[in-house]
Image: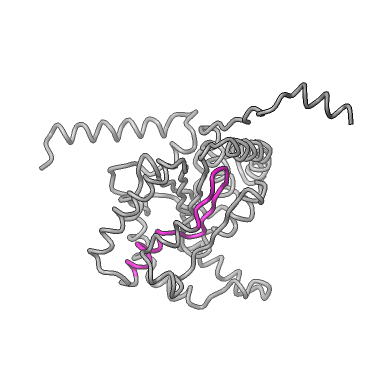
Amino acid sequence: MATKKDDRSQDGRKKKEQRKRNRPDAPLRDVLRVPEGERLDLTAYDASATPAGPAGKAAGLAATAALAPRLANLQERLYASSTAGDRRRLLLVLQGMDTSGKGGTVKHVIGLFNPSGCRIRAFKAPTPEERDHPFLWRITKALPQPGEIGIFDRSHYEDVLIARVRALAPRSELGRRYDQINRFEKSLADDGVTVVKVFLHLSYEEQRNRLLERLDNPEKHWKFNAGDIEERSVWPAYREAYEIALERCTTDEAPWYVVPADRKWYRNWAISTLLLEHLEALDPTYPPGDFDVEECRRRLLAT
């Protein structure tokens, strides 16, 4: 049973987190991070907002482009350090409703990196082979190697999202899965994986607009799925499923970030900035050579 002392301690933590988010110079990861131990209400988040972002679309596009050299340099340093035994790598997990921009993020944000150092995996409905294994089996096989940047377009969270909405698993099993996910992500962190989990927060109205755009443009019909219309009928159920997943699975080792996704330019800037902040925190370095530089120079000049 919670005591008054416990309540005061929790209130103190909440106020401390709020102060961190409200600082003018706060890192974006503090601004967008889902607070631990708090009830999450996604209806309180404005999907068209641009928290801590540039002043408008033109400025946002320019700011995102300006991040490219820094991201590329950090990626190269991360890979270089892995050649000397550094096991660190980064995993970006993208979740969101249909049309929220998971594919767009891969195109516009991951496009800022060297593709040879990225490992991209889109998770669809499990194959018969995957269904014969525990739900984390296919995830483990797709993890980035040391020095790489991994990107998951959907992820293991589908097994507590659509599985909850469509009753594909008993509630008791879903409860166990949240705990399994937390243990799994902690094991990743312990092995050198920086996990950056992003929920692309799209509004109901903006999803309608994007689906209409696909319907009205023959060149985008390949993107349209009539099943997306049916999925809109259970929008509140998906929102609740996301709220529970984000509440249960935001941790120190693998926090969730809510990125407003109605404005594509902001989405791209925000995710690029989150990746930059995490890579800068890793601060990978080029390893020293294991050879005599002057001796090799002398030999080379003699050829």
Q: Residue 143 in magenta?
A: yes
Query: What number of labels is visible?
Result: 0
- The correct choice, above or below, for 187 with respect to 286 in the image is below
Q: Residue 163 in magenta?
A: yes
Residues in magenta, as a range: 142-165
Q: Residue 6: where, in percent of width, then height?
A: 17, 35
- Left/right placement of residue 247 relative to residue 192 reads left
Q: Residue 78: where, in percent of width, then height?
A: 59, 38
Residue positioned 42% across, 32% down in the render: 22
- The correct choice, above or below, for 273 with respect to 183 in the image is above
- The correct choice, above or below, for 67 with respect to 237 in the image is above
The image's colouring method is: one colour
Q: Residue 186: where, in percent of width, then height?
A: 36, 45
In terms of depth relative to the viewer, which is nearer, 290 or 214?
Answer: 290
In terms of depth relative to the viewer, which is nearer, 251 or 59?
Answer: 251
Residue positioned 37% across, 53% down in the render: 42
Residue positioned 62% across, 75% down in the render: 221
